[in-house]
Amino acid sequence: MTRIRAAITGIQGWVPPYILTNKELEAMVDTSDEWIMSRTGIKERHILKGEGLGTSDMAAEAVKALLEKTGTNPDEIGMVICATVTPDMIFPATANIVCDKTGIKNAFGFDMNAACSGLLYALVTASKYVETGTVKKAIVIGADKMSSITDYTSRETCVLFGDAAGAILLEPTTEEVGIMDSIMHSDGSGRFYLHMKAGGSVKPPSYETIDAKEHFVYQEGQPVFKFAVTKMADVAAEIMARNNLKSEDVSYLVPHQANLRIIDATARRMGVGTEQVMINIERYGNTTGGTIPLCLWEWENKLKKGDNIILAAFGGGFTWGSIWLKWAY
Ligand code: UT7
């Protein structure tokens, strides 16, 4: 029997127009362009401005452009997963709101909360529905309005994050392309180092939680850095080894963009050169669910059918993982 794989058949990114530069941040907190560039590799990030706008608005822009560029009728979409840690609301799912804003009426959808690894988790989940023939066309979104949970008086975190959305179209194929293998991990004991303290069922919002600034990202940078460097490099090396992929077989590494130093360490471990790594952290910062689709979108014109691509991510949870895919067009 011919094996059906799930292939990426379209990719689209969207970033809001407003650009927050390191220079502007220097006026807001005690930081410097030199510190931010040398420790993170970030020069600027895009921020969604405007009353009443949320993650679904960015995601809807990406999805509408994706449908248009791939000539896909919204009625054909059977599934939408939105990877996000900044949903429009705790419920309903942002995926449902995006469907409403883009005219997708025949899909079921839900959100995926796996922080910076969310896009990979969502891609693997959707691929199973496509591989089994349950869904013919799936959309996987990675979108976050990180500015909505960032404390712009905290120099430890406010320099790191940006807002963005990316959307991926997945379809079945019988060719030797598409998602070839994946390895996903999580370890909830890492939650203490990277989380949002209030707003959930343990600590519902109150005047006290707002006064204590507990509705923002809390991160202990160094422990997260140590885990991220090790786990992201380990999992990328593991997926190469178990598929007998040598560094020269890999066309591109697409790493989650949290810190240029973590990206460099992962690339070194895989033995791939800088020209084989998609890096755009300088212009967008860490956009959580958005980083990997933003990279694929920006590199789309350079990709060739059959290119071996390794996606790798690490994030809050802790969650981490890697996907090996062969580009399909
Ligand atoms: O997205 C998925 C998960 N997240 C990550 O993968 C992020 C992992 N962590 C990191 O990328 C890094 O730990 C950070 C970029 C967050 C921080 O870099 P670091 O080299 O680990 O810095 P640090 O936290 O050890 O801080 C070093 C110093 C401290 O000052 P003292 O105590 O040495 O005097 C900080 O207060 O740098 C200070 N500092 C800053 N200085 C200027 C922290 N943030 C800033 C800042 N500007 N923005």
Image (cartoon, rainbow, N blue to C red):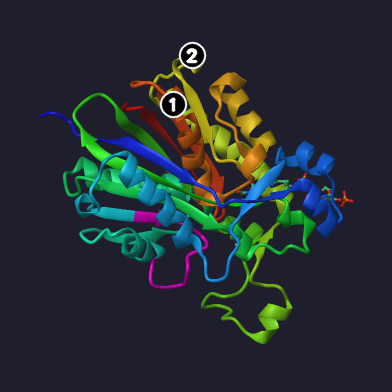
In magenta, the rendered stretch is 81-93
Residue 306: image location, x then y, percent: 34, 21
Does 329 appear in magenta?
no
Write the residue at 41% across / 64% down. 94
Left or right of 167 in this view: 105:
left
Which quarter of the figure is the C terminus placed in? top left
Residue neighbourhood size for the residue with mark 1, other residues' Cα within 10 Å, grouped as few (<14), some (14–19), many (≥20)? few
> Considering depth in this image, is 28 or 184 the residue closer to the camera?
28
Q: Which of 63 and 36 is in front in this view?
A: 63
Asked whether residue 215 is in view, the answer is: yes
Say which quarter of the image contains residue 266: top right
Image quadrant of residue 59?
bottom left
Residue 189 got which mark? none
Which residue is most to the right?
30
Q: Residue visible at 23% across and 61% down?
A: 105
Amino acid under disc 2: Glu
The spot of residue 53 in percent (x, y) is 52, 66
Above or below, 127 against 318 in this view is: above
Circle 2: element type: helix
| Chief SS of the magenta region | loop
Q: Does the magenta stretch include residue 87?
A: yes
Which residue position is annotated with label 2?
248
